[in-house]
Every structure is written in structure tokens, then in C-alpha cells.
Amino acid sequence: MNLFRKKFCKESDEVLMINIREGNKAAFEELYDRYSKRLLYYFYRMLNGDHDKAQDFLQDLFLKIVEKPELFNQHKRFSTWIYSVAYNQCKNEYRRLNVRRQYNQREEIVITNPETTHGPEERLDSRMFLRALEKELNKLEPEQRLVFILRYQENLAVKEIAEVTGLKEGTVKSKLFYITKKLADNLQDLNPINNEVMENAQIN
């Protein structure tokens, strides 16, 4: 890390955006490092597992930040704003393709890491469960899947999810309750060792 980047490594996202508005390249590089991997995986999950398209969306998103940093309200939390922009990108893509339920099954999702604490047979059960969970998530409407991802992948609070999606907090809670109950019902026959994924799906 060069001296310019080191200057910003402990700054908040919001401070970085102020510096980006002033044309600071090092601040942008720091922000990119913080969010690029997370947002790439987010786009991958939301765009039918299309890695190339996810990369394109990621680059478009950060290009917007470079070209129009003034769009960010510095009095708001950056993390919720950036996911709002990413969500709108995905919604526009859904409209363009008129896609609602045409999602392919993907290999695996990252919610827990079964490799670290369980034996070979348990790891196999975990992978089977995660594949089945991914298949069920792909059946959800985009907005439902987004809510689940933001809550259990990105660990956003209900209030933050409401800001990203434009939904009321009560609606977010209702959707989370419905989604987790539906997933638990559809996956109960697997009796996964990862039961905590469903059991811990509480609405805070």
C-alpha cells in the first residue's frame, strides 16, 4: 500500500466519498478495495450467476461513482446508498429482459463454511444443503431474494434494508419471516447439520 492509500485506510466510507468528489484517486482505490469483491458477488447472485455480466455491472457502478460522486448524499450511510444503486441496476436489467423466474442453479452459496468444523460426511451433507438452499433462493422473486441476501449475506439491519429497497421496515420484516419460513419448510427433509442457518433467521 502506497503512502497515499495508507492515508485513507482508516477513514470512513463517507470521508472517502468527500475526497473522491475532490478528485482524489487514492481515496477511490481504497473504496474500491473495500466493496468490489462484495458487490461482485452480490451482482453474481442477483444476475443469474452470470460472472461476465456481474463484472460489467460492477465496473458500471464504480464508473458512476467516479463520474458523478455528487449523487451521494454525504449525510447518509454509504453502504446503504451503494446497495440501493446496485439494486436499481439489477431492477433495470430485469425490466429490460423481462426476467422474473428464469434463474439457473449454481453450485454453492456462502453462508457458513462447513469445511472448518465438520468431518467428511458432515461436509457432504452441508454442501447438499447449501445447493438445495441456493435452488430454493433462485425460485424467489428478485426483491425477496435481495432482502434475504442483504440480511444474511451482507448482515444489514432491517432499517438499512428498508433504505436500500424503499420498503417499510414492517414490510421487510414480513418478507424475511415469509422467506425463512418457506425455506425452512422446503428444506426440512434434508435435516441439515446447518440447521442454525434457518434457526438463526430471526427478525431484529
Image (spheres, helix red, strand yellow):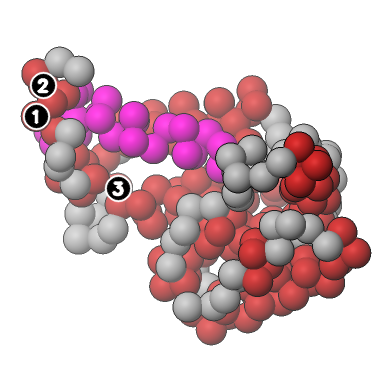
Residue under numbered circle 2: 4
Q: Which residue is located at x 78 percent, y 58 percent?
A: 192
Gap in Å between the C-alphas at discs 2 and 3? 25 Å
Gap in Å between the C-alphas at discs 1 and 3? 24 Å
Q: Amino acid at mark 2?
A: Phe
Q: Relative to 91, does residue 75 appear above or below in the rendering? A: below
First in sequence: mark 1 vs mark 3: 1
Residue 43 visible in image:
no
Q: Which residue is located at x 71 percent, y 64 percent?
A: 195
Instruction: Please provide percent x and percent y for residue 50.
Output: 70, 30
Gap in Å between the C-alphas at discs 2 and 1? 5 Å
Residue under numbered circle 3: 71
Q: Which residues are magenta?
A: 19-42
Residue under numbered circle 1: 7
Q: Amino acid at mark 3?
A: Leu
Other-residue count near label 2 (Cα within 10 Å), few / some / many at <14 / 14–19 / ≥20:
few
Q: Which residue is located at x 60 percent, y 31 percent?
A: 54
